[in-house]
Image: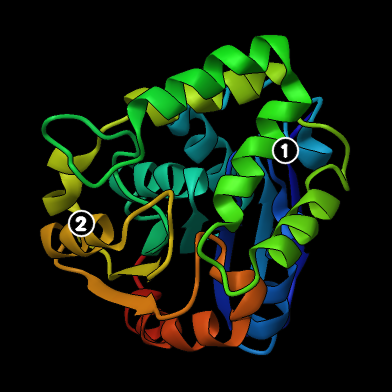
Amino acid sequence: MSLYIERLGRGPVPLVLLHGWAMHGGVLAPLVEALSERCTMHVVDLPGHGYSRQCGLPLEPSACAAAIAEATPPALWLGWSLGGLIALTAALERPQHVRGLAMLCATPKFARDESWPWGSDATLVHQLALDLETDYHATIERFLALEAMGSPDPRAELRHLRALAFARGEPDLRVLQEGIRILETRDLRARLPELRQPNMWLAGRRDRLVPPQAMEWSSQQAQGHYMQIEHAGHAPFFTYPDQVAQALQPLLDSFDGCGSHE
């Protein structure tokens, strides 16, 4: 089975949208609606997630980037959370296809260590990997709670995330484990200066998983543009989709200037 990619919107700017760990493309619906007049969107269910649950492709970022690029036109790419690591990989490895990059609550390295003070707690990430083996649903529930922290109404956002998480079926345990390994080990910091496309780094100021400082630093390394949404947590497109869409306007405007050379 191939990747499930839904085409939505009717605008002139092509945009590929990538969701985060244990989610599916449907969670990005508020942002899709906000951008529908401006963009034609290719909303991906990553391997093992949502309607791509039976897709045998590994979640490995280069493999995902290649498969998505083959199935979509040259476009801007937006990645949320884990999806940002895949979008960033695609921008580095397929610059002719990825014409601009939006990192939404996403960084080149997720887990904190001595060289990276702004990541998520490495012990927490490792514990999620261990817990997946013994209590699959409770592990996802705990991660959803972390995603909801920092939002204006964490309980309401957690209810929303819970309702959406399994709306397209449960994600495959194999890719959940692969995703945690990527979050534990992937480090693209040194490659940020290689980015040649317009790039936007959009943070939620109250994000408890991806600190805004990490995104601001990354934007400087990539010579990109940094913005934060003041009252948002890790999933700003739920509560503030119009603000996210507005923040993306400079990147959308840039597509006209880079869309002519194949």
Query: With respect to residue 258, does 176 lie above or below?
Result: above
Sort mark 1 into few (<14), some (14-19) or many (20+) by Cα contacts within 10 Å. many
Residue 77 seen by the camera: yes
Is residue 120 or residue 253 the one in the foreground? 120
Q: Nearer the viewer, mark 1 or mark 2?
A: 2
Residue type indicated by callout 1: Leu
Comparing 54 with 242, the one in front is 242
Q: Residue at x 53, y 83 (%)?
A: 245
- Per the image, the residue denoted by label 1 is 3
Pinpoint residue 93: horizontal percent, then vertical percent: 32, 41
60 w.r.t. 163: above or below: above
Q: Are marks 1 and 2 in contact (CB under 8 Å)?
A: no
Figure quadrant of the N terminus: top right
Is residue 55 in view from this perspective?
no
Expressed as whole percent of the image width and height from the top left, the position of residue 161 reads 74, 54
Q: Which residue is mark 2?
A: 218
Closer-to-camera residue (65/103):
103
Horizontally, residue 215 falls left or right of residue 139, namely left
Q: CA distance from mark 1 to mark 2?
A: 30 Å
Question: How many marks are shown on the rendered structure?
Answer: 2
For mark 1, give the secondary structure: loop
Write down the quadrant of residue 203 in the picture.
bottom left
Crowding near pointer 2: few (<14 within 10 Å), some, many (20+)? many
N-terminal of the pair, mark 1 or mark 2, is 1
| Residue at (34, 27) in percent of width and height | 122
> In the displayed structure, would residue 101 be above or below residue 44?
below
